[in-house]
Image (cartoon, helix red, strand yellow):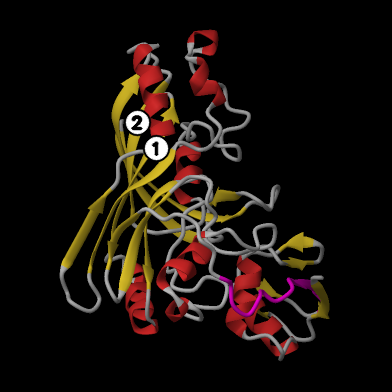
């Protein structure tokens, strides 16, 4: 069961994360920051998702602490599409539908469980008990390339590469309509939505800075008002749901996106191919991954074709 902590701020103004660290000696400041970003903290009954937000004396804070994760996930024989592997790291092409690491509601049958079974005991404990070896993640229904570390040293080195943005990453997304302009940059802040805790949202100042470069490569349907477009996205930052949020923000949500595409009118109406309306997941694929090997220094660069369901949807659009 989750634990709920009720705190009254005694002195202020102060940063939210620091005030909570002073009031909750059993929780580290980094742990409290994570709980804030995950939506586990309220201030005077309202969601508080910015660790740097100022709190004042008398503010009522509630912290929801989820139960601890199992000490070590177990290996499970789940097939992996291994793109590259050596004694230091492994690159896999994740299928849509596979959760990356154990979490409430998905305690096992994840990529982490598959990696432990494939790589052995050396992965356990790397990077935290809940996601050994993992330095970045993809949403459950996003397919494509991921890298995982096989040693603590390489995990630290890869984490630094991501922090410095020395990782080349590009994604392919099938979006509704056609972006105008066809090529551009979305530069915003992204924070947890105040209206739906499962969603992220573009904000003016709160949350974290997020930058996505996009380019529409092909469009499908009437030239003047296409049903959908294949868009290449390159990330400067890696925020939760970043591409999905940014594409919806410019009015062209990812096809099949259950969170960010609902409520937006589908181009073409009855004339649009049925597959476009019924695609069961967000049509988003991590197509390219490149970085310098943390041990050998070799330049590694990988590309992945879109999976069969994504390719079939494009073929349906071409024939529509």
Is 227 left or right of 30, judged from the image as shown?
left
- Toward the front, the furthest residue is 77
Q: In this view, does 109 lie above or below 234?
A: below
Note whether 47 is above or below 71 in the view shown: above
Above or below residue 305? Residue 225 is above
Could one spot residue 161 in this view of the protein?
no
Percent across and percent down for residue 230 are 34, 31
Q: Residue 41, image x and y in percent?
A: 72, 68
The disc, 2 or 1, on the residue closer to the chain's N-terminal end is 1
Residue indicated by mark 2: 230
Q: Which percent across, then down, holds residue 306?
A: 35, 38
Q: Which of 310 and 223 is in front in this view?
A: 310
Identify the magenta region: 58-74
Crowding at dot 2, Cα within 10 Å, few <14 / some 14-19 / many 20+, comes out as many
Q: Do the residues labelled 2 and 1 touch (CB within 8 Å)?
A: yes
Could you tell me which residue is drawn at 38 percent across and 77 percent down? 155
Kindly identify which numbered label has been placed on residue 53: none
Magenta: main secondary structure equals loop
Label 2 SS: strand
Distance CA(mark 2)–CA(mark 1): 6 Å
Q: Can residue 43 be seen in this view?
A: yes
Between 80 and 226, the one nearer to me in the picture: 80
The residue closer to the viewer here, 289 or 312, is 312
Residue placed under numbered mark 1 in the picture:
173
Q: Quadrant of the C terminus?
A: top left
Any magenta on residue 66? yes
Identity of the residue furthest to the left in this view: 298
Kind of element beneath mark 1: strand
Q: Identify which residue is drawn at 30% across, 31% down.
A: 182
Q: Position of residue 302 (x, y in %)?
A: 24, 54
Name the residue nearer the viewer: 96 or 77. 77
């Amino acid at each position: 069961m989750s634990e709920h902590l009720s705190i009254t701020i005694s002195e202020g103004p102060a940063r939210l994360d620091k005030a909570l660290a002073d009031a909750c000696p059993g929780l580290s400041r980094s742990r409290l920051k994570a709980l804030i970003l995950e939506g586990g903290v309220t201030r005077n009954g309202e969601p508080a998702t910015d660790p740097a937000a100022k709190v004042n004396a008398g503010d009522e804070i509630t912290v929801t602490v989820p139960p601890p994760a199992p000490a070590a996930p177990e290996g499970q024989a789940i097939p992996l599409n291994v793109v590259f592997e050596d004694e230091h790291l492994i690159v896999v092409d994740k299928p849509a539908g596979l959760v990356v690491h154990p979490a409430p509601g998905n305690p096992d049958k994840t990529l982490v469980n598959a990696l432990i079974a494939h790589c052995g005991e050396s992965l356990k404990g790397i990077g935290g008990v809940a996601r050994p070896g993992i330095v970045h993640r993809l949403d459950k229904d996003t397919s494509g390339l991921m890298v995982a570390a096989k040693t603590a040293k390489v995990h630290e080195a890869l984490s630094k590469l991501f922090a410095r943005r020395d990782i080349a990453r590009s994604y392919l997304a099938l979006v509704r309509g056609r972006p105008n302009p066809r090529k551009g940059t979305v530069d915003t802040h992204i924070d947890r939505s105040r209206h739906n805790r499962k969603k992220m949202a573009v904000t003016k100042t709160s949350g974290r800075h997020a930058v996505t470069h996009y380019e529409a490569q092909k469009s499908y349907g009437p030239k003047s008002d296409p049903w959908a477009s294949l868009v290449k996205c390159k990330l400067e930052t890696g925020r939760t749901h970043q591409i999905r949020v940014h594409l919806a923000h410019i009015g062209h949500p990812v096809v099949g996106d259950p969170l960010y595409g609902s409520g937006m009118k589908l181009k073409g109406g009855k004339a649009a191919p049925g597959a476009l309306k019924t695609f069961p997941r967000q049509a988003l694929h991590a197509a390219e991954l490149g970085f310098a090997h943390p041990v050998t220094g070799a330049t590694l660069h990988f590309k992945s074709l879109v999976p069969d369901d994504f390719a079939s949807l494009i073929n349906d659009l071409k024939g529509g």
